[in-house]
Image (tube, helix red, strand yellow):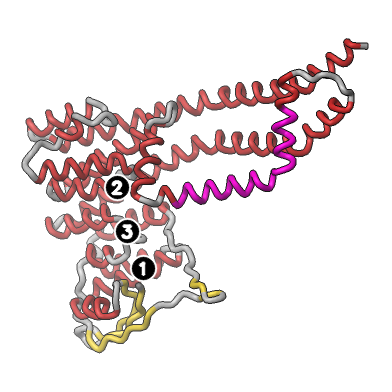
């Protein structure tokens, strides 16, 4: 739940903002720990329609978070006090939700909270990866260096996602257009053409009869097809949100013929990059694995990493689980084993991250060059089948006279 609060800090100044907690008592306790007194809380209620509560979307774009990380790292490197840096960053932030959060974080830091604790109270904006990295910088006294490193990693991840989305935009647009045109043809155009052929009374070839059957069903029940498709997509989306559904969906994605290799390498880049960042920031291996499991973005790899965490906690090598997994390339555990033995695991993780990033670049470039002719071939085959199903009976009728 969210509560708006009004309180006095240790110097007697009035402070206000938003605090998140499960209950009002926990919210009061959290504010008291920061040194606030005379705390007054008010639950934040979303406006409702017909008794249903509405909540506006609060997801903050990834680009805004990348800009925030870079601005904060630059200000911290210039030895500007953290409270001033946060307020300056908030003043330059365009996104209203992020600006509101940064103002609240600045108030909390000014009241005595650690930056990591203040950011951790806003999980909708700042991931556990970011919070743990900043906490490690606070512990080691290298917050400025950690912020710089974190900004670089966030920019790399953002560039990687942008590159993949840009590569997929064109084929997605073409496929959507192809499906839309095909639907219009089958529902409104084909029935008129095949209706003329049926009136001749001639024996129609099998492809034409099949086309007429499919077109007749779609023209009669197009509304049912649209409702069924929408229901299936909504149901799939809800199923994917369940732990089991998420696992099967992610397992399906990494086993796709063309895109599976891309999804696998994206997960591996996130794992190696986040582990390198966390370990270099002073986070212990067990905690780093726990954070990396959430960062990796794939339930299959998340379970593998969490199992690795348990093995490491029991004293085993970090490579045991990876070595016996069928979805992890053998090169990864082999190189990590060498890094463990030589004490250069950070260097190995960095090189692995660079290697898989280059592989992703090559895969994206190859897919962009292959998808366009593949779509053209599929489109040509589909159009050819439809044309053949319409032209063949016309040719038969013409030759019969």
Which residue is tagged 2?
A: 295
The CA span between labels 3 and 2 is 12 Å
- Res. 191 in view: yes
Q: Quadrant of the N terminus?
A: bottom left
Question: How many labels were placed on the picture?
Answer: 3
Question: Judging from the image, what secondary structure is the residue with disc 3 in?
Answer: loop
Image depth: mark 3 or mark 2 in front: 2
Of 222 and 318, the residue lying toward us: 222
Which residue is tagged 1?
A: 101
Q: Are marks 1 and 3 in contact (CB under 8 Å)?
A: no
Side (left or right) of 146 relative to 398: left
The image position of residue 60, as x and y in percent, is 42, 59
Label 3 Cα crowd, 10 Å radius (few <14 / some 14-19 / many 20+): some
Q: Earlier in the sequence, mark 3 or mark 2?
A: 3
- Res. 156 in view: no
Question: Judging from the image, what secondary structure is the residue with disc 1 in?
Answer: helix
The image position of residue 288, as x and y in percent, is 18, 48
Magenta region: which residues? 211-238
Instruction: Write the residue at 59% across / 46% down.
Output: 228
Q: Is residue 278 above or below residue 2?
A: above
Q: Earlier in the sequence, mark 1 or mark 2?
A: 1
The image position of residue 210, as x and y in percent, is 70, 26
Of 123 and 397, the residue lying toward us: 397
Which residue is tagged 3?
A: 126
Q: Are marks 1 and 2 in contact (CB under 8 Å)?
A: no
The residue most toward the right is 401
Label 2 Cα crowd, 10 Å radius (few <14 / some 14-19 / many 20+): many
Label 1 Cα crowd, 10 Å radius (few <14 / some 14-19 / many 20+): some
């Amino acid at each position: 739940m969210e509560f708006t609060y009004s309180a006095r800090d240790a110097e007697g100044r009035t402070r206000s903002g938003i605090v998140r907690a499960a209950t009002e008592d926990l919210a009061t306790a959290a504010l008291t720990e920061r040194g606030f007194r005379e705390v007054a809380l008010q639950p934040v209620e979303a406006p409702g329609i017909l008794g249903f509560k509405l909540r506006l979307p609060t997801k903050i774009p990834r680009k805004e978070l990348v800009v925030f990380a870079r601005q904060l790292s630059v200000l911290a490197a210039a030895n500007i006090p953290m409270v001033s840096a946060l307020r300056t960053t908030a003043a330059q932030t365009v996104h209203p939700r992020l600006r509101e959060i940064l103002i609240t974080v600045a108030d909390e830091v000014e009241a005595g909270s650690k930056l990591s604790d203040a950011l951790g109270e806003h999980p909708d904006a700042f991931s556990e990866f970011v919070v743990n990295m900043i906490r490690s910088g606070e512990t080691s006294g290298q917050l400025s260096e950690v912020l710089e490193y974190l900004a670089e990693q966030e920019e790399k991840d953002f560039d990687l996602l942008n590159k993949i989305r840009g590569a997929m935009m064109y084929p997605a647009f073409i496929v959507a257009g192809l499906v839309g045109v095909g639907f219009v043809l089958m529902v409104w155009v084909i029935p008129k053409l095949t209706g003329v052929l049926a009136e001749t009374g001639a024996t129609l070839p099998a492809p034409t009869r099949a086309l007429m059957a499919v077109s007749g069903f779609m023209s009669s029940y197009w509304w049912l097809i649209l409702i069924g498709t929408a229901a299936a997509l909504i149901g799939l989306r809800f199923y994917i949100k369940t732990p089991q559904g998420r696992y099967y969906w992610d397992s399906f994605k990494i086993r796709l013929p063309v895109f599976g290799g891309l999804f696998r390498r994206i997960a591996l880049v996130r794992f190696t990059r986040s582990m390198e960042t966390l370990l270099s920031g002073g986070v212990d291996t067990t905690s780093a694995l726990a954070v990396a499991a959430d960062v990796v973005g794939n339930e299959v790899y998340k379970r593998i990493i969490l199992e690795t965490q348990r093995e490491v906690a029991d004293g085993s090598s970090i490579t045991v689980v990876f070595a016996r997994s069928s979805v992890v390339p053998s090169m990864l555990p082999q190189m990590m084993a060498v890094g463990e033995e030589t004490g250069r695991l950070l260097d190995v993780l960095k090189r692995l991250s660079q290697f898989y990033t280059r592989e992703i670049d090559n895969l994206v470039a190859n897919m962009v060059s292959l998808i366009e002719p593949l779509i053209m071939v599929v489109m040509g085959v589909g159009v050819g089948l439809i044309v053949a199903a319409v032209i063949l009976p016309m040719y038969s009728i013409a030759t019969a006279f």
